[in-house]
Amino acid sequence: MNSGKKMHKTTNLIKLVFIVILSLILIYSILLFAPSADKNLIANPGFESGSTQPSNWEFMTTDGNTPVWDSVHHNGTRSIKISVPGTAGRNSGYPKSDLIKTESQQYYTLSAWGKTENAGADHVPAVRVVELDANKNWLNQTNLVFDRGTNDWTQKSMDFKTGPNTAYLYVYANIWNGYGTFWVDDVSLSKTSAPAPTPAPTAKPTTTAAPTPALMYNTYYVAKTGNDNNPGTEQSPWLTITKATNTLVAGDTVYIKEGTYNENVLIKNSGSPGKFITFAAYPGDSVTIDGTGLSVDMYDGLVQIPGSSYINLSGLRVINSKFTGIMVGRDYGTNALPSNIILEKNYISNTAASAIFVENGKNIILDGNEITKAQTMEGLSQQAGETISLVNVDGFEIRNNKLYQNNFESINAKEGSSNGKIYNNDISQHESAGIYVDAWSGNSHDIEIFSNKVHDGRVSGRGIALAIENGGTLKNVKVYNNIIYNNAATGIDLSWYSKGTIDNISITSNTVYNNGLIDSWGGGISADYSPATNVIIRNNIVSKNNHYSIRSKNTNAVIDHNLIDGYIGSQDEVKGSDYVEGSPEFINQANADFHLRSTSPAIEKGSINSVPNMDFDGNMRPRNASYDIGAFEHIS
């Protein structure tokens, strides 16, 4: 009996051991084959491996300056050192990662460690991530900036979302138009989940004591199932956007949920520095402000921001306005002027007048909006503004917008608008100028127009035009790295009908192809305002344009180092000096790919003077001994 019990115990022990081993095998199998958490997508992120430079990274030289693989480090034994000697702002060489296959509409987190020494000038050191499409064309760039001066190792991090056409990313770091030393180490790029909306606030205390700071800035909600007598929480939302406009104060946010809101929106409350009032579509929801059947007074908007400041409108659809879609201007009751307005990722369509009209504003950002069928003039006797109109605005950025099938001019910075940038916009199927800067009777100055695509203009559709229509002044305008093609009229036009003072205009490193398709006065680039002073037309590709390649009635203009393909010899047409003549050998102009083939005569034939240090794709110039002509620097 005892031996039987011992044998039974031994058998049970063997079974127990077997079960434990089997369980461990199953657990480790699950761990082995379970999907792992997202890891760093960058190869060699600490710059530790390699022979003469880090593996999977390329060192690019700019202006004789190349990064260094350095022994100063945050972690491991190495980092990358980027430096610009002296105290004059210059562009550094830069390290560039291998291409990283990525997903569109995906959230990513970029982080890096940086150390600076005597960093100064107008710009700051930065680690940058560039988005490319499936054909490896530049789409967008996001910057992770570090502080000026001397600072020990510091980690910086940011979240961003790739665009709908993003297929690749690469990361690079540089000092742009600055000086000093910048070390970079432990760079990380990883997928992350979409940020959740700020949770609904807790109920406010019933005591009459002043609220604590944590309760001063709230997040509210509007939904079609709501009621304006509700507290505005996610569980008990308001019904109308108007309720939100009357309630929100500095620092507050309202998320508007799915649905069509048939109401005029008037935003009179203001935020304050660092405390914007934000009106945003709830993430993933389609939110439409529809003006059907609503009255909108002349020179008003379906959405109006009169004299308010620090306002952000994000992700909304604004349609069917009987005048302007979004109007930002003076409050004629208080005489307050608008400032620090952000209009981003909105869709605006079917407006009788302008889609966006901003007047007498300061620090205005229009970013990533999509606009179509503006200026329909329904119910109006004449044109009132342009698709995007900026009137006497000081400090602005119009960037990453898509405008198509709109009447009249598309983007117009006019009547004294100054200190602004217009870039990365895609403009097509317009009737007049795609981008127009008209000082009118005001004083417009310091405007940059770069990295835009303006194409397929109809009727009298020009690409980019500069003018003064009523005796003002226009000074310090740079037009560079733009791609202008297949337009009805002139590609880039310094307009003959100007009346006033035009000075210090540079038109450099643009690609201007196949323009002047309809209008008999249309062609490539014109400088037809003879009184203009200090005009430079340099390093442009001007190819297959009707009627003329470069025309200049301004005998003082400096015209050099352009590639001319299709000189006609028409009146006032010129070649300038140091020009290149012949086909630019684009990769595929029929599909609007204006990158250069390796055999292009434009390569290394450009001037090094007064030209941009980056190309349309965000690549540093020059790649080799000298600059390439046109909007793209050739990359093998």
Image: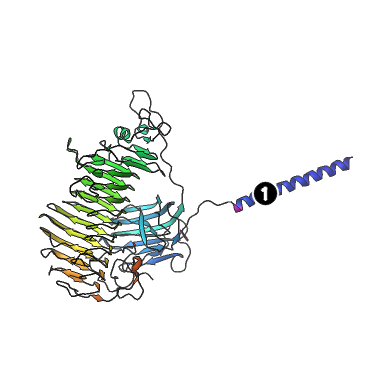
**Occupied quadrant, residue 300:** top left
**Occupied quadrant, residue 451:** bottom left
Image coordinates of residue 273 in percent, x first then y, are 28, 41
* Residue 51: in magenta span: yes
State whether the magenta stretch is mostly helix, strand or loop: loop
User: Which residue occupies the foreground of this view, 591 or 474?
Assistant: 591
User: Which residue occupies the foreground of this view, 255 or 76?
Assistant: 255
Image coordinates of residue 200 in percent, x first then y, are 41, 34
* Total numbered labels placed on residues in the image: 1
* Residue 583: in magenta span: no
Q: Considering only vertical position in the picture, is 567 above or below 363?
A: below
Whether residue 157 is visible here, answered yes or no, is no
Q: Is residue 619 left or right of residue 26?
A: left
Question: Which residue is pictured at 13% across the width and 51% down the height?
Answer: 442
**Occupied quadrant, residue 123:** bottom left
User: Which residue occupies the foreground of this view, 216 or 125?
Assistant: 216
Check disc 1 and report the residue beneath it. Answer: 24
User: Which residue occupies the foreground of this view, 31 or 462?
Assistant: 462
Question: Which residue is pictured at 66% across the width and 49% down the height?
Answer: 26
Whether residue 489 is visible here, answered yes or no, is yes
Q: Considering only vertical position in the picture, is 390 above or below 507?
A: above
Q: Quadrant of the N terminus?
A: top right
- Callout 1 secondary element: helix
Image coordinates of residue 221 in percent, x first then y, are 38, 35
At label 1, the amino acid type is Leu
Residue pushed farthest top?
207
Q: Which residues are the magenta region?
A: 32-54
